[in-house]
Image (tube, rainbow, N blue to C red):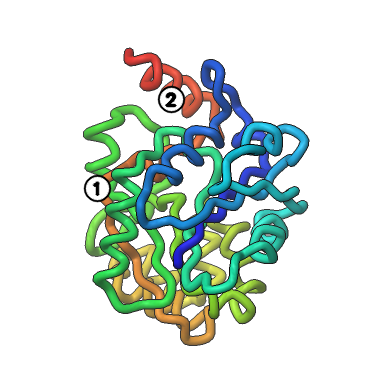
């Protein structure tokens, strides 16, 4: 069984696009995926609880002060038999069921315990020219991180401390590289670092958890609304402009 957890504690998840909040677009896309049994939202129950009161597939729990705390609130509600967790943020309103299905189906064909979505710069810019994203230069190409993460339920207890650090450094590539070590940093700065080497280093930091970067052709998984330019872009797209 795979359960989706949506982190919606931040203000970005509650940005309104027309009559709907950003997180509502995310939840709707998740509900349309046949691969997911349930969706648990970690966010303000007062604002979101009533919206999903009569939807059996969806449950809302109050989030914490940090993304990791919010995740733990949702983690406590996982139904018995949950084998995998799909973690998504509530601020990617362009997310589609098609993108979710691609990510989950690709992960199912790979060996690993943790799968992190990434998108090539050229793919992002071809579909959404002008979209401002944080990119990482690897020998394999230029990538931006996606906001979908899939992992085996059993790895959670041993990864929480490192997960907190990753969340803090996610959009600071130089700081992230410094955190993982000088050899890694040098490879990154000289653009000699490969995706396979990055995966190996993440696995080491997580105590041997086999980690895999999954290149996705759907830039919607990474278009979050944490800047005014992002909000303007999403409004234009949703309005069909």
Q: Residue at x 47, y 20 (%)?
A: 232
Residue 66, picture quadrant: bottom right
Q: Residue at x 64, y 32 (%)?
A: 51
Give coordinates of residue 35: x percent, y percent.
37, 57
Q: Quadrant of the N terminus?
A: bottom left
Mark 1 surroundings: few (<14), some (14-19) or many (≥20) residues within 10 A: some
- The answer to whether marks 1 and 2 mark residues whose Cβ atoms lie closer than 8 Å is no
* Above-or-below relation of 25 to 41: above
What secondary structure is marked by label 1? loop
Please tell me which residue lies in front, 114 or 41: 41
For this view, does 154 lie left or right of residue 192? right
Give coordinates of residue 124: x percent, y percent.
29, 39
* Above-or-below relation of 182 to 86: below
Q: Residue at x 54, y 79 (%)?
A: 154
Give coordinates of residue 185: x percent, y percent.
45, 70
Q: How many marks?
A: 2
Q: Quadrant of the C terminus?
A: top left
For this view, does 198 lie left or right of residue 218? right
Mark 2 surroundings: few (<14), some (14-19) or many (≥20) residues within 10 A: many
- Which comes sooner in the sequence, label 1 or label 2? 1
Outermost bottom residue: 208
Q: Which residue is mark 2?
A: 234
Residue 217 got which mark?
1
Give coordinates of residue 190: x percent, y percent.
33, 65
Spatial separation of the CA atoms under disc 1 and disc 2: 18 Å
Residue 23 got which mark?
none
What secondary structure is marked by label 2? helix
Q: Residue at x 30, y 30 (%)?
A: 128
């Amino acid at each position: 069984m795979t359960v989706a957890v949506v982190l919606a504690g931040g203000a970005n998840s509650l940005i309104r696009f027309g009559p709907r909040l950003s997180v509502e677009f995310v939840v709707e896309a998740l509900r349309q995926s046949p691969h997911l049994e349930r969706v648990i939202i970690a966010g303000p129950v007062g604002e979101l609880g009533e919206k999903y009161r009569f939807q059996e597939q969806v449950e809302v729990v109050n989030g914490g002060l940090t993304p990791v705390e919010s995740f733990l609130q949702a983690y406590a509600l996982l139904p018995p038999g949950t084998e995998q967790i799909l973690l998504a943020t509530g601020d990617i309103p362009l997310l589609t069921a098609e993108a979710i299905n691609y990510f989950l189906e690709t992960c199912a064909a790979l060996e690993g315990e943790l799968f992190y979505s990434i998108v090539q710069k050229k793919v992002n810019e071809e579909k959404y020219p002008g979209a401002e994203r944080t990119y990482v230069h690897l020998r394999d190409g230029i990538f931006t991180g996606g906001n979908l993460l899939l992992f085996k339920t059993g790895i959670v207890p041993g990864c929480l401390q490192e997960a907190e650090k990753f969340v803090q450094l996610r959009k600071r590539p130089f700081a992230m590289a410094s955190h993982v070590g000088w050899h890694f940093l040098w490879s990154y700065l000289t653009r000699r670092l490969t995706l396979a080497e990055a995966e190996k280093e993440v696995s080491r930091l997580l105590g041997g958890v086999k980690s895999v970067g999954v290149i996705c052709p759907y830039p919607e998984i990474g278009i979050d609304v944490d800047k005014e330019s992002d909000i303007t872009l999403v409004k234009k797209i949703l309005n069909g402009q």
